[in-house]
Image: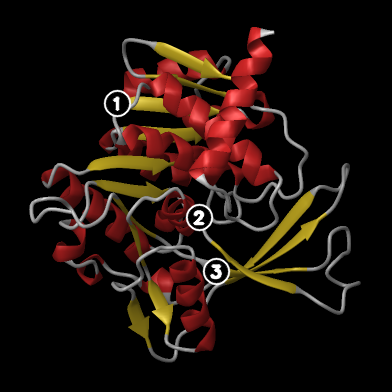
């Protein structure tokens, strides 16, 4: 790395929580043990990209206690820089509880995150030197839902990043347990318009932004509003993207599902990874689909895979299409 190169390929900020989960299929009231992991959309993207060899830094406010320290250590173990974390005394880490069941029950989530250390972040907490250390900023719509100060922080950081000409990705990542669709749309639409690339699930495009049609049509409608690149994800059906001139579509790759948590973050990570190298958008979508498919087979929130494994999945997929 030369003196004029940014220290980090990507930086990101947000809340990461302690995830507590009974063994697969059991209800919270049945189990006497809970698996403990850490999860958060932005931290997932940071860890995924670090595992692919990218230089990544994650920022947040964390409680200066054993749980906060263990969270930071777990991210460092994934290869993520945590040196800019703001440590807070006498505060708490957010929790969430997850039950994983087979259909028709499916996955259920309960949050216990009110008044967490992360929810008290302020714009002035984010150092200018940290923003200046990167070439890409990734944000999600979860953070502005946590508090007024979190919303102000995201808006301020995005404004400063644009002034410094960082590339910006924004994942809507709507959480109905945190705020209403109407409130979310009013805040998130301007943030999507300020980003270079916006990710949104098809269901959220329908419910929040009143975009109608299939994923390809919705990508075109939202790109007309926001500009940049809009990627519309459609779960296990695939994703579509539109950049104002060309439309692209990718089907999801088949996978035996072990854990759905973090699959959307893995897809976004794969797309960002290829765009960091200015790869064609179609290639970025395929890489994201392969990373998401691998993540579905892995317990936890992070796609614990190598770049070579993703490439092998892509090669097998290409071979099957040629037959």
What residue did someone put label 2 on?
44
Could you tell me if residue 115 is visible in this image? no
Is residue 125 among the parts visible in the rendering?
Answer: yes
Give the mark nearest the N terminus, 2 or 3.
Answer: 3
Of the numbered discs 1 and 3, the one sitting upstream in the chain is: 3
Q: Quadrant of residue 63?
A: bottom left
**Residue that numbered label 1 is attached to:** 228
Q: Secondary structure at mark 2?
A: helix
- Measuring from the top left, give residue 237's x and y in whole percent: 66, 24
Q: Residue furthest left?
A: 4
Crowding around mark 3 (Cα neighbors within 10 Å: few <14, some 14 to 19, many 20+) is: many
Disc marking residue 17: 3
Please give left or right for residue 30 compared with residue 68 in the image.
right
Secondary structure of the residue carrying numbered label 1: loop
Which one is earlier in the sequence, the residue at label 2 or at label 1? 2
Q: Is residue 45 above or below residue 202?
A: below
Instruction: Locate residue 306, reporting x and y percent.
Output: 53, 47
Mark 2 is surrounded, within 10 Å at the Cα level, by few (under 14), some (14 to 19) or many (20 or more) other residues, namely many
Above or below residue 223? Residue 134 is below
Name the one closer to the observer, 264 or 1.
1
- CA neighbours of label 1 inside 10 A, class few (<14), some (14 to 19), many (20+): some
- Residue at 51% over, 25% down: 286
Image quarter where the C terminus lies is top right
- Kindly identify the residue that appears in the image at 72 percent across and 29 percent down: 254
Q: Nearer the viewer, residue 1 or 90?
A: 1
Residue displayed at 40% across by 50% down: 53
x and y percentages locating residue 52 in the rendered image:
45, 48
């Amino acid at each position: 790395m030369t003196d004029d190169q940014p220290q980090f390929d990507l930086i990101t900020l947000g809340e990461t929580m302690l995830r507590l989960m009974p063994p697969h299929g059991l209800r919270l009231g049945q189990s006497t043990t809970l698996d403990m992991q850490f999860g958060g959309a932005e931290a997932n993207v940071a860890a995924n990209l670090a595992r692919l060899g990218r230089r990544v830094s994650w920022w947040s406010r964390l409680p200066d206690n054993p749980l906060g320290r263990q969270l930071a250590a777990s991210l460092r173990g994934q290869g993520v820089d945590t040196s800019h974390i703001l440590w807070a005394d006498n505060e708490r880490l957010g929790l969430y509880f997850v039950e994983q069941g087979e259909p028709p029950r499916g996955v259920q989530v309960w949050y216990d995150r009110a008044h967490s250390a992360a929810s008290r972040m302020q714009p002035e907490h984010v150092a200018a030197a940290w923003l200046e250390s990167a070439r890409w900023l990734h944000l999600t719509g979860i953070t502005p839902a946590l508090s007024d100060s979190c919303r102000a922080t995201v808006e301020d950081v995005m404004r400063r990043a644009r002034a410094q000409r960082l590339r910006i990705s924004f994942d809507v990542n709507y959480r109905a347990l945190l705020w209403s669709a109407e409130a979310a749309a009013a805040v998130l639409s301007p943030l999507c318009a300020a980003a270079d690339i916006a990710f949104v699930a098809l269901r959220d495009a329908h419910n929040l932004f009143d975009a109608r049609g299939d994923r390809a049509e919705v990508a075109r409608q939202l790109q007309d509003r926001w500009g940049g690149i809009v990627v519309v994800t459609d779960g296990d059906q695939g994703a579509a993207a539109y950049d104002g001139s060309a439309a692209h579509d990718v089907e999801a790759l088949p996978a035996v599902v072990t854990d759905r948590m973090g699959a959307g973050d893995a897809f976004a990570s794969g797309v960002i990874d290829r765009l960091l190298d200015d790869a064609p958008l179609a290639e970025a979508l395929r890489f994201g689909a392969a990373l998401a498919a691998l993540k579905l087979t892995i317990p936890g929130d992070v796609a614990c895979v190598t770049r070579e494994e993703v490439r092998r999945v892509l090669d097998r997929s290409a071979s099957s299409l040629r037959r």
